[in-house]
Amino acid sequence: MSSIDTPLKVSIVAPCYNEEEVIEEFVRRALAAGRSAAEGSFELVLIDDGSRDATWSKIEAMSRQHPEIVGVRLMRNHGHELASTAGIASSRGARILLIDADLQDPPELLSDMMEMMDRGADVVYGQRGVRKGESWMKLTTAAVFYRLLRWLASVDIPSDTGDFRLMTRRVAELLLSMPERDRFLRGMISWIGGRQVPIVYERDERHAGTTKYSYSKLLRLALDAITGFSARPLRIASWAGVITAFIALGLLVYTFYSFEAGWAVTGWSSTMVAITVFSAVQLITLGILGEYVGRLVQQSKGRPLYMVDRVVRDGQDIQLLDCPEMRGARDPRSVTRDPFLP
Ligand code: UDP
Ligand code: MG
C-alpha cells in the first residue's frame, strides 16, 4: 500500500530502548490519546532500538491484544535519531506524532496538536515550559548548546524543543528523502521550513527507568547538530590559523631582534608559551577538521541507515521482504526528490 493514500489519520511513533518499566503505561496512554484525538483512526508504531531487556517481548504481547500497534525491532541499538527515522519510515498515517516512550512528553497533547494542524500548520512542535526532574547540569549544558547552535548554524532551530512534534505526511516524506546518517531530526525538520508552530507544555519527569542518553551520547548529538548545520567551525579554525600566523610573525621579528641585540638565551619561557599555544591551536584545528572528515567518510560508504530484524503488524509477524519497514533501509541516494512533485 502506498503510504500516501492512507486511511489512517495519525501514526504515533515512539522509539524505545530498554523501556520495560514504562512501555505498558506508555502504550495505555498513547492508545487512549489516539482513540480520542483521531477517533480511532491511528496506529501506534513502537521501535525497539535493540533493547536488551523485556521491551520487545512486551511489545509483541501487546500487539496481539491491540491491532493498532505496529512493532518494529531493529537488529541492534542504532540510537534515538535513527530509531525515530525507522519509525517514521514504517508509519502510514496522514500525520505523524514523534514522541518519547518514557512519558516525559504527554501523549494527551495530541488532540491540541491535531487542532493546530487543522488550522494549517505543517509542524506543531512541543516547546518545554517547565522541565521537572532534570539535573542542573543537564539544563545548563542544554541552554549553552542551544545558544551555541543558534550562533553557529545557518538554520533557525528553536530552543528548548526536543523531538516531540506532530508533522504532516509531506514533511515526513521530505525528512525521509534526506540521506544523511548523522541525523539531528529537530534541526532537519526546522530546515524543511513551512509553517512550524510551537505548543508550550510542561515536560514531566521520566515515568520510570533512567535516561538512555549518557553525556557522551549527548555530546555526539551536539556535534552532529553543529557539523550537520554549519561549516562555521571550519572557518573559525582558519581564522585561528591566520591570527596565530600573525602572532608567530611578530615573535619571529622579536627573536631576530633579540639575537642581534645579544640577549637571546634567556628566552625559555617565551619559547614554551609559543610552543604550547601553537600546538594547542593546531590540534584544535585538526580536531575540527576530523569531525567533518570522519562524517564524510561514513556518509560516503552509503550503508543503510539502520537494519530491521522483525516486524509485527495486526498481531502477526510479517515477512520482511519488500515490506514498507525496509524503506528507510533503502539506498538513501535513490530518494532525493520531493515525492509530492510531479
Ligand atoms: N532511545 C532510543 N535509543 C537510544 C536511546 C534512547 O530509542 O539509544 C529512546 C528512549 O527509549 C526514549 C527516547 O529515545 O523513548 C528518549 O531517550 P531518554 O528519555 O533516555 O532521553 P532524555 O529524555 O533523558 O534526554
Ligand atoms: Mg526522556
Image: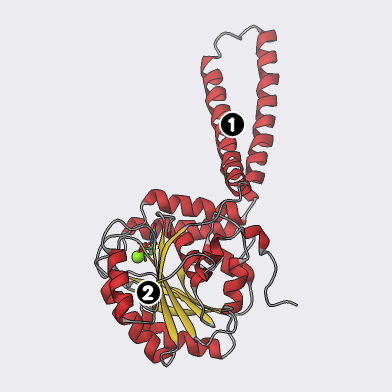
Quadrant position of residue 156: bottom right
Q: Residue at x 40, y 48 (%)?
A: 216
* Above-or-below relation of 89 to 270: below
Q: Residue 115's x, y, as percent?
A: 49, 90
* Above-or-below relation of 297 to 139: above
Type of residue at label 1? Answer: Gln
Horizontal relation, residue 327 to residue 211: left or right: right
Horizontal relation, residue 109 to residue 119: left or right: left
Q: Residues within 10 Å of mark 2 (few under 14, many from 20)?
A: some
Q: Residues within 10 Å of mark 1 (few under 14, many from 20)?
A: some
Q: Residue 135's x, y, as percent?
A: 31, 59
Q: Is residue 196 something that shows in the picture?
A: no
Type of residue at label 2? Answer: Gln
Q: Residue at x 69, y 31 (%)?
A: 246
Q: Nearer the viewer, mark 1 or mark 2?
A: 2
Which numbered dot is residue 316?
2
Quadrant of the image containing the C terminus: bottom right
Distance of label 1 from label 2 (alpha carbons): 57 Å
Q: Residue 73's x, y, as percent?
A: 39, 63
Q: Is residue 326 something that shows in the picture?
A: yes
The colour scheme of the drawn protein is secondary structure
* Above-or-below relation of 84 to 250: below
Quadrant position of residue 49: bottom left
Which numbered dot is residue 282?
1
Q: Quadrant of ligand 2?
A: bottom left
Horizontal relation, residue 132 to residue 272: left or right: left
Q: Residue 15's x, y, as percent?
A: 40, 66
Pick the residue in front: 304 or 33.
304
Which numbered dot is residue 245?
none
